[in-house]
Structure formats: C-alpha cells, structure tokens
Amino acid sequence: MIKVITSAERHTSNREWIHSEFSFSFADYDDPSNAHFGALLAHNDNELSPGQGMHEHPHHDLEIITYVVSGVLKHQDDLGNHAELQGGSVQVMSAGTGINHSETNPSDSANARFLQIWLLPDQPGRQPKWDAKFYPAEHKTNTLLPVASGKGEESALEINENVTIYLSSLERSRALKYQQREDRRTHIYLISGNLEIACSDGVFQLQPGDAARIRKSCDLILKGTGSDSNAEFVLIDLP
C-alpha cells in the first residue's frame, strides 16, 4: 500500500526566524491520527533565517538525525561537541539519558535549510552520543547512499534503531530498484526535483515536499523525471 502525502497536506509553522513544514504531529501541530509512521516520530523540513536558531534545550530517549540541505548549521552540546555543518552534512544525536544542545545559523546573509528526523530508539536509557559526516554530492548521485543506520551499513553513521536512512539524487530518466520487504515500512520524502514511484499499486508522481508512506508493497522502481534538476530524496527503511 502506498499513501502519498502532498506538500500542501503538511502542517506549516511560519515564524519570523524559522519556517517549518511538519510531516507528523510536532510542536503546535497535534493530530493523533498523524502522530508517527512506525518508529518515525517527526520529519520536519526547516528553513532557518541568518543569525537565528534554537537556543540550548534538552532531549532524551530520541534518535535525532539532521540532514543539512543547504547553508550552514552550527551545533553545540553539553557533551563538548562543536561543529559547523555544511550543506551535504548529516548529523546524528542519540539523546539517551539526556543531552542539551543548540542549533543556529551562523551566516549573516543566507538561510540554512535542514531536515530533522526523530526516531524512537530500540531501548531507553542509553548513553548519549553525537556524530556527523559530510557526504559529497557525487556519492549519492544515481544510487541509494546509506547515511545513518542501526544495521551496520558501511559509510553510515550509527543510530540505536533497526532503521536505515538513505540519500539519493537521481538524474532525469535514471532509475533505481528498491526491494520493499513485507514486514518493513518505507518513507520517501522528495527534497527537490520530480520523482516517479512505480509498483503493483500503480505509478505515483511526487513533487517537491511530497512524501510516500509505503507498507506491504512490491519492489519499487524510483525514477527521476524532472528536466531542471535531479530528484533529491530521503528514503527511510524502518520497522
């Protein structure tokens, strides 16, 4: 079964300092029928204004994965980690028993766009940790690049859940086959460009900001269809 959630169906939170699109219940958006998809609790697309940010605040018992789409995102936490994450960087933060952190945009002229993904961990009370890695654009072109995983995927940052997050950027008419397991869920979110998803359920066309929630489906054929830019997307394999 494939359910497409269009960009317009997301919840928009528009503040002076940050614009956010929420795929699931988050902050001031409370919809019990749209609280999660398996272990996936949040999938936010954020645009942070220059010089703005989220001041230090706590988390616990969450796996938080951040993908910087463009601009720079500055991270600091009470474990002593400091980093300025360029576009193309992925950050993982296992909050565990507790972590305090801040995320800010150090630029005085450019917005920072980033996706933030929240997952339930495989168990509560783990030791908190943080890590980050930059992935060059060519590493995700016309392939599925694992960037965060609890299954020991090579090149991927480690998380505490049986989930793998992939990045991909498909050129026009290039296609990938993804085997959808019967006992797993797949969440696909299109960052930019145009993407076609085909399986026995039919053929679905995704525009930027659209998502597909997939369960008990056939093998998926993912195809870039845009003429102006690659189809850049995130694919999450989860229980």
Image (spheres, rainbow, N blue to C red):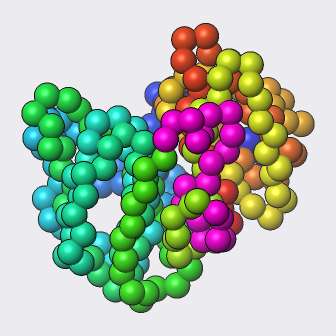
Question: In percent of the image, x 53 and y 76: which residue is there?
Answer: 160
Question: In percent of the image, x 56 and y 61: which residue is there?
Answer: 156
Give the magenta-colored segment's residue range.
136-154
Q: Nearer the viewer, residue 38 or 48?
A: 48
Inspect this view and state whether residue 12 appears.
Answer: no
Query: Residue 183, position in %: x, y?
Result: 80, 64
* Quarter of the image that includes the N terminus: top right
Relative to 156, is 189 above or below? above
* Quarter of the image that includes the C terminus: bottom right
Q: Is residue 150 left or right of residue 80?
A: right
Q: How many marks?
A: 0
Question: In percent of the image, x 23 and y 39: which residue is there?
Answer: 48
Relative to 64, is 49 above or below? above
Question: In percent of the image, x 46 and y 28: which residue is there?
Answer: 8
Relative to 130, is 44 above or below? above
Query: Residue 5, position in %: x, y?
Result: 58, 36
Does the magenta run of residues contain 233?
A: no
Q: Is residue 195 left or right of residue 189?
A: right
